[in-house]
Amino acid sequence: MKTLTTLLILLVTSVTIGQVQFGKKESFAFSAYVDPNASIKENGLDIGIDIEYRGAMYAKFGIESFAQLPGGYFDIHGGYGLRLTYGHFENLATYAGGRMGVAFRNGAPNPIAGFEGGVDYTFDSGLLIGINGSYIFRGDMKSMGWDEIWRENFYIRVGYSWDW
């Protein structure tokens, strides 16, 4: 039984590793996302939109708004990082990289920077769904008279991808 289990683990691992690759297909994607935890906690809507290039690396630009936070919140951000795809058709992808931008709170611009990562699945029709997490240094807290902090966020996103 041990030998069978070991062989099965080796088989699954080798097939899985053989399917992992840097994204070879180049495409663009437009997506909208929401942070459900923050939205529920603050009784508001933490929502954003991104446009991104997707290949072996990803590069994106977007905006996020969360008007219900004290002083309001609006940011302009960008991200860049590594993107791995799985399978022959590259429908499943994981990515990780940096994220930085400018957050406006009480009308004052403040820096934000940190890390992000996520998983996306793109259907053959171009529809994409995914989850994304970020860990961001929030410089906008000083405009509220609070200490600057590192804050984690979790997003659910839906969008459309098209080949380049």
Image (cartoon, rainbow, N blue to C red):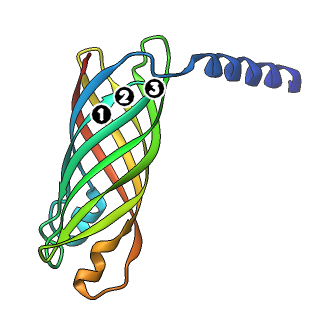
Do labels 2 and 1 touch, CB within 8 Å?
yes
Q: Which badge, 3 or 1, is on the more N-terminal residue?
A: 3
Judge whether 18 appears above or below 109 on screen.
Answer: above
Q: Which badge, 3 or 2, is on the more N-terminal residue?
A: 3
- For mark 3, what is the residue? 56
Judge whether 41 appears above or below 33 on screen.
Answer: below
**What residue is drawn where x is 45% and y is 22%?**
23
Task: Estimate the x, y position of residue 145 in percent, counting from the top left.
Answer: 27, 88
- For mark 2, what is the residue? 121
Q: Secondary structure at mark 2?
A: strand
Label 1 neighbourhood size at 10 Å, few (<14), some (14-19), many (20+)?
A: some
Q: CA distance from mark 3 to mark 2?
A: 16 Å
**What residue is drawn where x is 22% and y is 46%?**
62
Amino acid type, residue under disc 3 in the picture = Ala
Judge whether 98 appears above or below 146 on screen.
Answer: above
**What residue is drawn where x is 37% and y is 84%?**
147
- For mark 1, what is the residue? 129
Q: Which badge, 2 or 1, is on the more N-terminal residue?
A: 2
Do labels 3 and 1 touch, CB within 8 Å?
no
Label 2 neighbourhood size at 10 Å, few (<14), some (14-19), many (20+)?
A: some
Amino acid type, residue under disc 1 in the picture = Ile
Residue 66 lies left or right of residue 80; in this view the side is left
Task: Estimate the x, y position of residue 137 in percent, counting from the top left.
Answer: 40, 67
Q: CA distance from mark 2 to mark 1?
A: 6 Å
Task: Estimate the x, y position of residue 10 in percent, counting from the top left.
Answer: 76, 21
Residue closest to the far top: 88
Amino acid type, residue under disc 2 in the picture = Tyr
Q: Secondary structure at mark 1?
A: strand
Q: Nearer the viewer, residue 108 or 7?
A: 108
